[in-house]
Image (cartoon, helix red, strand yellow):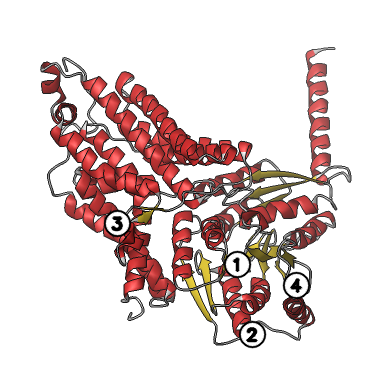
Amino acid sequence: MSDFLTVSVLLATLASGIRLATPFLLAALGETIGQRSGVLNLGVEGVMLLGAYGAYYATLRTDSILLGILVSLIVGGVMGIVYGVVTLALKAEQGISGIGIFIFGLGLSDLLFQKQVGTPTPIDGLGDVAVPLLGDLPWVGEVIFHQNVLVYVAFLLVPVLWFVINRTPFGLNVRAVGETPEAADSLGVSVDRTRYITIFVGNAMAGLAGGALALELGIFQQNLTNGHGFIAIALVYFGAWRPSGVMAGAMVFGLVSATVLQWKTLGIVVGTTASIVGMFPAVLTILVLVLVSRRTGQPSALTRPFERGH
Amino acid sequence: MGRRGWLVGLLAFALAMAACAEEEDAGRSADDPIRIAMVGPSASNDLAFTQSMVDSLDRLGQDYNIEVDITDGTFVIEDAAVAIRGYAEDGFDIVLAHGSQFGGSLSEIAPDFPDTVFAWGTSRDTFGLTNVYSYSVQSDEGGFINGTIAAHMTESNIIGVVGPIEVGDIKLYIDGFVAGVKSVDPSITVNVNYIDSFSDVALAAEAAQAHVEAGADVMTGVSQMVVGATGVAREHGVLWFGSQTDQVPLGEDIVVASQIYRWDFQLSQIVEDLLNDEVSGRVITADFSNGGLTMAYNPGLPLADDVQAAADAVEAGLKDGSVSTGVE
């Protein structure tokens, strides 16, 4: 354990935790704004996969990471429109629709990959960018302020989203349609339009989360996201529908995963013990969800479709 | 023709058709292809376990008249079970359940189709059924060769291993790799990290990053998640050793050598048994001495003469029995 408790290893673990947390954070923040408006999207995983493939394929073909990022956002946004039509216009049950979006994303991303690319082909992924001045700080500068650009974007979105939800008229509308859509409607707030916007933004962020994963790894393969989207949904509950809480959850999950990896690498845990310790992130998530389930904060109208006059 | 005549004629026709059908079932014409179905856990082109079987079926097709159908991406075992049963119902001659995780399903399905030949692996268990073959590999041998080369090439004397789950041919390969390194220089540190997932690419990348930060300048790994680890290796110029298929496409500048699984070694024996009507169900293990395992070296990253000579000597020793990996 003394090998682990050195400054360099602890900082490396922190850096690893931040990288691991980023896709979770992007996707969970997107899901947060959707759920705050009363819409649950269990299809985050599928949208992430499509965003990941879109970003990967665009970058593979054009060598433009910027285009890759843009494509992941567009793909996510398009899936948001689809999900909005299905759940808002057609009034389909949100849970089942989300599962459908997941299966669709899983299948289509794999099909496109098989037909258009085939064998996993590496691309030049996102490089690290040092923040001026802060990147020169001793120890922490190298760890926290030498990250790829989407890491900074993800963490900057936390205060931005908090501000939008809590300090803007649009955010007030979002909260209103998520709590009492009938009251919001009676005050002239368009429930469906508000939800369309949150679903569009949330899915675009899920697409970006997938893109962040593919561009960080510089590769795509079948089921690349491997459950990231579902964990992101759990993190929304973990964070009690608050951006800061979601960020805390993503960081805890990322740091626990990174710590377990470091322990295994350094031989601190081996064999059966390592396998048991390897379950810590999942066990922690379940424990926190059990504890959080007793707290208030869940939007009252979550999963409830709105129909005027009902 | 009266009504009775029609009935007799109809009965004769039905009996004739039934006889023809029995005749067709009784044996395969020499011109008929052998129908082989394969169910794999990941993508057919994963540059790892599933692709190793797809490549082997391609090679098998050069020697035998076969017709192949593949269902890949069945990482959900229940989906694989449906595919395995479906292929058996469709009358395929040989059904390959390519993954040790499919054993439980196969043990329930195989008894229902005694005329279908099943094969699965990696495993050494046929469930006592005469229509079930299991295939395995002495992957520790290729691991030992890779480890020997890696020990000669490391400058930091720290080597990293990214493994999925500590089972079967994966564990054999990694144990063999560590033994190979230690056979050259016991003082070299080999950090082994099993990430408990065959498919978590992001976690594999972070495990590789942890190895790099611990000072590793050479790494190896197994299963389809290694595409994450090789990305980190490329970024840091860390040398990489592969297993299951030739992994040069994952990094022409870093992949030194790969152990190749040649499942066609086992498949050809199963096909011969089928053709000779000698299906018996047995365990078939590939190794370097029987040609079921081979090495592939990256021509773009040639080894120094002394290192290549050391690798060749180990391979020759494994073949003639004078070298043992010491792995149980």
The CA distance from mark 2 to mark 1 is 18 Å
Q: Quadrant of residue A236?
A: top left
Name the spot of residue A119 as percent of width and height, x first. Answer: 63, 47
Q: Which mark is residue B184?
A: 2
The local crowd at label 4, few if under 14, some if 14 to 19, many if 20 or more residues have their Cα within 10 Å, is many
Q: Give the residue furthest to the top.
A: B1
Determine whether the residue tagged by mark 4 lies in a helix, strand or loop.
loop
Amino acid at circle 4? Phe
Q: Identify the element where label 2 is drawn.
A: helix
The spot of residue A53 in percent (x, y) is 51, 40
Chain-order first, disc 4 or disc 1:
1
For disc 3, the neighbor class at 10 Å (few under 14, some 14 to 19, many from 20) is some
In three-dimensional space, the C-alpha distance between marks 3 and 2, rounded to whole angstroms, equals 45 Å
For disc 4, the chain is B
- Do marks 4 and 3 share a chain? no
Frontmost of labels 4 and 1 is 1
**Mark linked to residue B239:** 1
Report, in whole angstroms, how far the alpha carbon at label 4 lies from the one at label 1. Answer: 24 Å
Q: Are discs 2 and 1 both within one chain? A: yes
**Residue ID at (53%, 58%):** B235
Of callouts 2 and 4, which one flags the residue occurring earlier in the amino acid sequence?
2
Q: Amino acid at mark 3?
A: Leu
Question: Horizontally, is B280 left or right of B151 in the view?
Answer: right
